[in-house]
Amino acid sequence: MHTSGFDPVVMRQARIGRSLREVYDCVTDSPLPDQFDALLAELDKIGKPTGSN
């Protein structure tokens, strides 16, 4: 039985969680490249209904 209060598995999971949060924050804070933004705009045009049948 582990009684020291420092569980190495929990500490490792916390470290992995912090690392994943840093990567996620970096990606979500990055601006979209212009070409990707233009592609999304084109896809929006294609996906919008043009009228009723």
Image: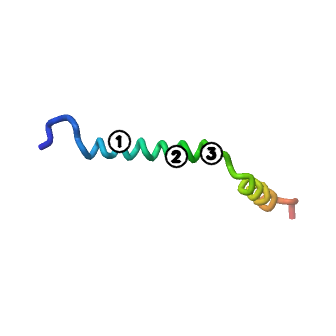
Give the amino acid type for the residue marked by disc 3 in the picture.
Ser
- Which x, y percent locates residue 45? 81, 58
- Which x, y percent locates residue 40? 74, 56
Which residue is under mark 1?
A: 14
Residues at circles 3 and 2 in contact by the CB criterion of under 8 Å: no
Of the numbered discs 3 and 1, the one sitting upstream in the chain is: 1
Gap between marks 1 and 2, in whole Å?
15 Å
Number of callouts in the render? 3
> Which numbered mark, 3 or 2, is in the foreground of this view?
3
| Residue displayed at 57% across by 47% down | 27
Of the numbered discs 1 and 2, the one sitting upstream in the chain is: 1
User: Tag 1, which secondary structure?
Assistant: helix
For the C terminus, the image quarter is bottom right
- Which x, y percent locates residue 19? 43, 45
| Residue displayed at 68% across by 49% down | 32
Q: Picture quarter containing residue 52?
A: bottom right
Of the numbered discs 3 and 2, the one sitting upstream in the chain is: 2
- Which x, y percent locates residue 50? 86, 60
Give the number of the disc on residue 30.
Answer: 3
Residue 46 higher or lower than 16, as above or below: below
| Mark 1 Cα-neighbour bin, 10 Å: few <14, some 14–19, many ≥20 | few
Give the amino acid type for the residue marked by disc 2 in the picture.
Tyr
Q: Picture quarter containing residue 4?
A: top left
Which residue is under mark 2?
A: 24
Gap between marks 3 and 1, in whole Å?
25 Å
| Residue displayed at 79% across by 59% down | 42
Residue 3 higher or lower than 35, as above or below: above
Residue 20 higher or lower than 45, as above or below: above
| Mark 2 Cα-neighbour bin, 10 Å: few <14, some 14–19, many ≥20 | few
Give the amino acid type for the residue marked by disc 1 in the picture.
Ala
User: Tag 2, which secondary structure?
Assistant: helix
User: Tag 3, which secondary structure?
Assistant: loop
